[in-house]
Image: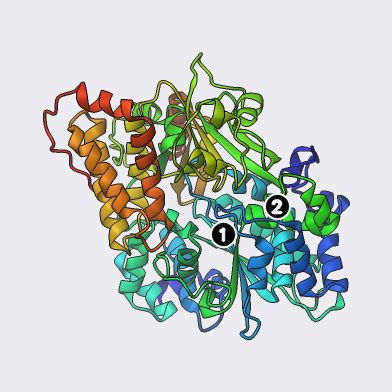
C-alpha cells in the first residue's frame, strides 16, 4: 500500500466504489483532488502513487493533470484567487477589478504575493456572470465562490487570511 | 405564469426534502415505477415536446427512445458542466431546486432502463457537488434510491463526478471520455452515445435543465406542458441574462418571449444612459446580432432566432451596449476559445490560435485591413471542419461581428497606423 493509499484508504475506497470494478481509471480525477489537497499541488511521487492504485501509467496521470486547469504540479500561493474576466464579467468591469486586486497585492496576473500566501489568476468562465465581478478561491479547503465583489471586499478577504496566518 | 424550473422562487425552502415532498415531490417517480412501463414514461416525455436545453434543442423523448435495448447495462449521464460564458442557469436549479432535478434524473434512468446515473459537474461546482452528495445520501436513507424501489425489481444509484476546469467537457462525448478518466476530448461520431456511450455502453446524456422539467411533465401531463411556449418549442426556458443590463439574472419565461421583453421588462433595460447595440443570444458561442427593432421583437425560440442570423442555443443572452467596440469583444471570446480548444483536431487547435493572434493585433491597433479580411477567411475555413462544435462556435462572433459591425473594425484599423506586429500569444 503506497503512502497516498495508506493515508486516505477509506476515502479512496469510497471513490472507487462509484465506478465499475473494471473501470478504475474513472477515479483518476477524484484521486488527483485528494492528492492535491494538502499542499495545493500534485508531486511526481503522487503521480506514481495514483497510477499504482488505478493500474495505469504515471504518464497517463500526468497527462490528465496537464489537461485540466484545476490541477497544479508546482507549489504556489496557499490561496489561489481566481478572477473570471471572460466576456460577460468583463462587461461588468472584471478587467478593472482584476487590475485593482493585482495592484493592491503587488502582483501581476499569475503572480504570487511575496509572503507566498496568495496567487492571483485570471481564469475562464465560472458560471456566475450575473454576479460579476467575482472570483473563486481554490485552497486546501476546496473551492469557494465570492460574488458581487469590489477590490475592497477582496482586500478584506485577503486580510482575513493573513490574520489567520499570524494566529 | 407558473414557474416550472425555478419553483423555489415561489415555494420557500424547496431545497429541503420535507418541503419538496409536501409539494408533491417524488410522487411522479413513485407512480412511474409502480404503474408505468419505462417506455410509457418515454412516450409521455415525447408527447410533451420537451427539447434538450443544453443548446442543441434535440427532442428529449426521441433521444431516450434511441437507447439500444439489446445491450446492457445502460447509463444516464447528466451534463452539469456548465462552462459557457453567459450561462449560469443549471447552477441555480441544482442549488435551489435540487430534488426536482434529482427526480428528473431518476425518471430518466427508469425510462431508459439504467440502474446507474452519473452527474458530471464542472470542478468549480465543488460545494454544489458536496450538497448533492448529501441529498443523494438522504434519498438512499428514505428508500428513494437503492435496491428494489417501492417493492419493484428496479434499483438505482446516483453518483456525482467532478470535472476539473475544461469547457470542452460540456461536449457530450468529451464528457464521457473525461468520466472514463481520460483527456476530455470529443469522440468521432457516429456511433452516438445511445448506442455507444459511457464504457462503450448505451448512454443517455442530458442537460440539467432538461431533466428538471421531467417530474412536472409526469405530474401534470404533456398537454399542460404544451400550454407553455410555442408549438415546436413547448415549455418554459431559463434565460440567463448578463452583460450591460440593469438586472442580470435567470428569468424563466415561455419559449417565444421576445428579446425586448426579456431585456427591457425583466432585465430593467440598459444602465448608465446607454443604448443597446448588440445581443448574443447563446453566450460566447453565439453570433452577434444587431439590436435593431426587428431583432428586439423576435421571439426567443428554436425556430425564430435563426431568422435574425443566430441560434437560441442555451439561451444565455449577453447584452452589449453602445460603448463597446466589437474588436475588443471578439478578442475576449477568441481568448476563451483558444484557451479551451482541446487540441484534438487541427482546424480548431490551429484556427483558434491564429484567430486569437489576429484579434489581439486588431484590438491593439497593430493590424492592417488585410488582417481583418484574413481573420474572416481563417474563420470561414475553420467553420464546419472540426470534430465537434467548439471549433464552429469559435467562428460565430468573429464572422458575424465583421459582417455586421464593420465600422468598429475600421475604427481600430484605419485610425491607428500599425506600429508593430510583435504580439505574442501563448497558451496561459
Of residue A36 and residue B257, the one placed in the foreground of this image is B257
Indicate the position of residue B21 as horizontal and vertical percent values.
85, 54
- Residue B307 in sight from this viewpoint: yes
Q: Which mark is residue B98?
A: 2
The quarter of the picture where residue B358 lies is top left
CA separation in Å, label 2 and label 1: 15 Å
**In the visual, does A65 lie left or right of B129?**
left
**In the visual, does B405 lie left or right of B255?**
left
What residue is at 46 percent from the left and 52 percent from the top? A140
Of residue B373 and residue B102, the one placed in the foreground of this image is B373
Mark 2 crowdedness (10 Å alpha carbons): few <14, some 14-19, many ≥20 = many
Of residue B301 and residue B32, the one placed in the foreground of this image is B301
Name the chain letter of the residue that bears numbered label 2: B
What residue is at 75 percent from the left and 38 percent from the top? B9
Indicate the position of residue B261 as horizontal and vertical percent values.
65, 29
Which is more N-terminal, label 1 or label 2? 1
Indicate the position of residue B361 as horizontal and vertical percent values.
21, 35
**Nearer the viewer's eye, disc 2 or disc 1?**
1
Task: Mark 2 vs mark 1: tell me if same chain.
Answer: yes
Mark 1 crowdedness (10 Å alpha carbons): few <14, some 14-19, many ≥20 = many
Of residue B34 and residue B225, the one placed in the foreground of this image is B225
Q: Which mark is residue B79?
A: 1
Name the chain letter of the residue that bears numbered label 1: B
Q: In this picture, is A33 found above or below A165? A: below
Q: In this picture, is B406 found above or below B381? A: above
Residue at the far bottom: name it: B70
Amino acid at each position: 500500500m503506497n503512502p497516498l493509499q495508506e493515508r486516505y484508504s477509506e476515502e479512496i475506497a469510497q471513490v472507487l466504489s462509484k465506478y465499475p470494478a473494471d473501470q478504475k481509471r474513472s477515479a483518476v480525477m477524484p484521486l488527483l483532488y485528494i492528492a492535491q489537497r494538502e499542499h495545493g499541488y500534485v508531486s511526481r511521487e503522487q503521480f506514481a502513487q495514483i497510477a499504482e492504485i488505478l493500474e495505469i501509467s504515471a504518464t497517463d496521470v500526468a497527462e490528465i493533470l496537464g489537461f485540466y486547469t484545476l490541477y497544479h504540479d508546482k507549489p504556489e500561493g496557499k490561496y489561489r484567487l481566481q478572477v473570471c474576466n471572460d466576456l460577460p464579467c468583463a462587461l461588468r468591469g472584471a478587467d478593472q477589478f482584476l487590475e485593482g486586486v493585482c495592484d493592491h497585492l503587488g502582483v501581476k496576473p499569475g503572480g504570487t504575493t511575496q509572503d507566498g500566501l496568495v496567487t492571483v489568476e485570471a481564469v475562464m468562465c465560472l458560471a456566475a456572470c450575473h454576479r460579476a465581478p467575482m472570483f473563486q478561491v481554490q485552497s486546501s479547503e476546496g473551492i469557494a465562490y465570492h460574488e458581487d465583489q469590489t477590490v475592497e471586499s477582496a482586500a478584506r478577504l485577503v486580510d482575513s487570511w493573513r490574520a489567520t496566518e499570524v494566529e | 405564469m407558473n414557474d416550472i424550473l425555478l419553483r423555489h422562487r415561489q415555494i420557500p425552502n424547496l431545497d429541503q426534502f420535507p418541503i419538496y415532498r409536501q409539494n408533491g415531490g417524488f410522487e411522479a417517480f413513485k407512480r412511474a415505477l409502480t404503474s408505468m412501463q419505462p417506455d410509457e414514461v418515454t412516450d409521455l416525455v415525447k408527447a410533451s415536446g420537451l427539447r434538450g436545453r443544453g443548446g442543441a434543442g434535440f427532442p428529449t423523448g426521441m433521444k431516450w427512445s434511441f437507447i439500444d435495448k439489446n445491450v446492457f447495462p445502460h447509463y444516464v449521464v447528466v451534463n452539469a458542466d456548465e462552462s459557457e460564458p453567459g450561462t449560469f442557469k443549471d447552477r441555480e436549479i441544482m442549488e435551489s431546486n435540487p430534488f426536482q432535478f434529482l427526480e428528473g434524473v431518476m425518471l430518466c434512468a427508469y425510462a431508459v432502463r439504467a440502474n446507474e446515473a452519473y452527474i458530471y459537474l464542472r470542478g468549480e461546482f465543488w460545494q454544489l457537488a458536496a450538497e448533492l452528495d448529501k441529498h443523494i445520501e438522504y434519498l438512499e436513507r428514505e428508500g428513494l434510491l437503492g435496491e428494489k424501489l417501492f417493492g419493484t425489481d428496479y434499483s438505482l444509484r446516483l453518483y456525482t463526478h467532478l470535472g476539473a476546469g475544461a469547457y470542452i467537457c460540456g461536449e457530450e462525448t468529451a464528457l464521457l471520455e473525461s468520466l472514463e478518466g481520460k483527456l476530455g476530448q470529443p469522440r468521432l461520431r457516429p456511433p452516438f452515445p445511445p448506442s455507444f456511450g459511457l464504457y462503450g455502453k448505451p448512454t443517455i446524456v442530458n442537460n440539467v435543465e432538461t431533466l428538471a422539467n421531467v417530474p412536472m411533465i409526469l405530474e401534470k401531463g404533456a398537454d399542460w406542458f404544451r400550454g407553455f411556449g410555442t408549438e415546436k418549442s413547448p415549455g418554459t426556458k431559463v434565460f440567463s441574462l448578463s452583460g450591460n443590463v440593469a438586472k442580470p439574472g435567470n428569468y424563466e419565461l415561455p419559449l417565444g418571449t421576445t428579446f425586448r421583453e426579456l431585456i427591457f421588462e425583466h432585465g430593467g433595460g440598459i444602465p448608465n444612459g446607454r443604448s443597446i447595440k448588440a445581443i448574443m443570444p447563446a453566450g460566447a458561442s453565439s453570433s452577434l446580432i444587431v439590436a435593431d427593432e426587428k431583432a428586439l421583437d423576435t421571439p426567443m425560440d428554436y425556430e425564430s432566432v435563426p431568422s435574425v442570423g443566430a441560434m437560441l442555443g442555451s439561451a444565455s443572452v449577453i447584452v452589449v451596449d453602445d460603448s463597446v467596440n466589437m474588436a475588443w469583444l471578439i478578442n475576449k471570446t477568441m481568448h476563451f476559445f483558444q484557451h479551451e480548444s482541446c487540441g484534438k483536431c487541427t482546424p480548431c487547435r490551429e484556427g483558434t490560435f491564429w484567430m486569437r493572434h489576429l484579434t489581439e493585433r486588431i484590438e491593439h491597433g497593430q493590424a492592417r485591413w488585410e488582417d481583418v479580411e484574413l481573420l474572416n477567411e481563417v474563420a470561414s475555413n475553420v467553420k464546419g471542419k472540426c470534430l465537434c462544435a467548439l471549433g464552429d462556435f469559435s467562428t460565430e462572433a468573429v464572422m458575424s461581428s465583421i459582417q455586421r459591425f464593420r465600422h468598429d473594425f475600421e475604427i481600430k484599423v484605419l485610425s491607428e497606423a500599425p506600429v508593430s506586429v510583435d504580439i505574442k500569444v501563448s497558451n496561459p
